[in-house]
Image (cartoon, grey):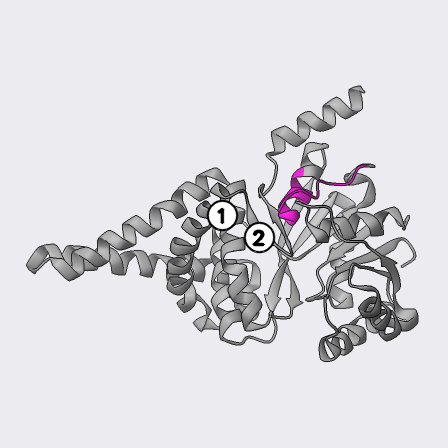
């Protein structure tokens, strides 16, 4: 499809031959369907090895180090957009694995939208991917999850793209499209594979994901209440006796069971039972406890000036849509 560009922002400080080989095989297959552009912010020698692995399957756009306080992924995406002209764009993290049929369906959905967001599904499913899957299922039950990829019309973002000074870049992109009057459609039925991160990276992501909640004040307030509530339940079970202890235990069990029920509701939505095993929802209590702790760590990082990310520190999770709309209006007026 000559009118589609697949943009993949990438940065690796050191060569990773197995990961590069796996990604290269994917890009060679993908290049049979769309133009592929890798916005590579890796050091020169690493970038050269990547380019050699892609060969003719992908065009490499060299990206310099991001400015302080900026998200390197967004910097890479903006560099790729500036170097290409196709009217339809697929933006995807390096761990996303589209198949041709699902990509065709997503592109067709652009007939009625300015941006289409699918649902990521970890494949394979080691223990930490199952843990993180619970978060996705809860998000599906509450509305929608945020994927590591989006399909959009180039003109939906406007000439300035979207702000790189945010942590939650996917939400920033969505809100920018909406602020310009565009339509964003979430498609939980479009299931796109995603490779799970190494365990160390999974651990590093816990606080950053909690920090994203600063972009959702109501959700942030609810998550901040989790630790005091769970702590009170545990204290009540340990310190009380008789009916009082039973009441606290019942409350604790109810909270954890509620998390499982919520995740299961997400699993059953939009054909999710075909993608996730029945045991997936049982990981929700682990994620609930994780978020109860990590959201307070995120608050501490916020007080210290922002969350550490890829060698810099980012304070803002994402801009409110109203603020982006105001900025867009002022730009048009100017």
Q: Which one is nearer the viewer's eye here, 17 or 133?
A: 17
Q: Is residue 250 magenta?
A: no
- Highlighted magenta segment, given as a residue range: 160-175
Q: Quadrant of residue 56?
A: bottom right
> At 56% across and 54% down in the image, what residue appears?
145
Q: Of marks 1 and 2, which one's residue comes earlier in the chain? A: 1
Q: Is residue 28 above or below residue 43?
A: below
Q: Is residue 279 above or below residue 79?
A: below
Q: In the displayed structure, does residue 27 sit left or right of residue 255?
A: right
Q: Residue furthest top?
A: 333
Residue 170 seen in the current view: yes
Q: Which one is nearer the viewer's eye here, 87 or 189?
A: 87
Residue 268 seen in the current view: no
Quadrant location of the N terminus in the rendered image: bottom right
Q: In the displayed structure, does residue 123 sit left or right of residue 226?
A: right
Q: Secondary structure at mark 2?
A: strand
Q: Secondary structure at mark 1?
A: helix
> At 71% across and 53% down in the image, what residue appears?
73
Q: Which residue is mark 1?
A: 301
| Residue 81, percent from left and from top | 84, 48
Residues at marks 1 and 2 touching, judged by CB atoms closer than 8 Å: yes
| Residue 232, percent from left and from top | 23, 52
Q: Is residue 169 magenta?
A: yes
Q: Is residue 313 above or below residue 198?
A: above
Q: Which residue is mark 2?
A: 308
> At 49% across and 52% down in the image, what residue appears?
210
> At 59% across and 72% down in the image, what residue appears?
198
């Amino acid at each position: 499809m000559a009118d589609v560009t697949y943009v993949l922002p990438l940065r690796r400080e050191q060569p990773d031959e197995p990961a590069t080989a796996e990604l290269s095989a994917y890009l060679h297959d993908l290049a049979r369907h769309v133009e592929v552009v890798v916005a590579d912010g890796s050091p020169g020698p690493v970038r050269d090895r990547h380019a050699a692995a892609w060969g003719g399957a992908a065009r490499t756009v060299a990206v310099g180090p991001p400015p302080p306080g900026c998200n390197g992924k967004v910097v890479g995406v903006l560099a790729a957009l500036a170097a290409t002209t196709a009217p339809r764009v697929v933006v995807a993290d390096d761990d996303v694995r589209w198949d041709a049929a699902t990509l065709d369906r997503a592109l067709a959905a652009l007939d009625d939208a300015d941006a289409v967001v699918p649902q990521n599904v970890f494949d394979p499913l080691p223990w930490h991917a199952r843990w993180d899957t619970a978060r996705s299922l809860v998000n599906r039950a509450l509305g929608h999850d945020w994927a590591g990829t989006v399909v959009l019309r180039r003109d939906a973002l406007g000439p300035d793209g979207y702000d790189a000074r945010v942590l939650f870049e996917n939400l920033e992109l969505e809100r920018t499209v909406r602020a310009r009057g565009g339509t964003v459609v979430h498609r939980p039925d479009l299931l796109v594979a995603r490779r799970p991160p190494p365990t160390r990276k999974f651990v590093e992501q816990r606080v950053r994901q909690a920090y994203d909640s600063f972009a959702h004040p109501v959700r942030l307030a609810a998550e901040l209440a989790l630790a005091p509530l769970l702590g009170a339940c545990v204290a009540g079970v340990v310190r009380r006796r008789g009916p009082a202890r039973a009441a606290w235990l019942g409350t604790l069990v109810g909270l954890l069971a509620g998390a499982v029920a919520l995740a299961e509701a997400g699993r059953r939505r939009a054909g999710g039972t075909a993608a996730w095993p029945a045991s997936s929802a049982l990981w929700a209590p682990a994620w609930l406890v994780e978020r109860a702790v990590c959201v307070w760590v995120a608050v501490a990082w916020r007080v210290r000036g922002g969350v550490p990310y890829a060698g810099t520190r980012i304070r803002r999770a994402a801009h409110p849509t109203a603020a982006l709309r105001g900025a867009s209006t002022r730009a048009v007026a100017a």
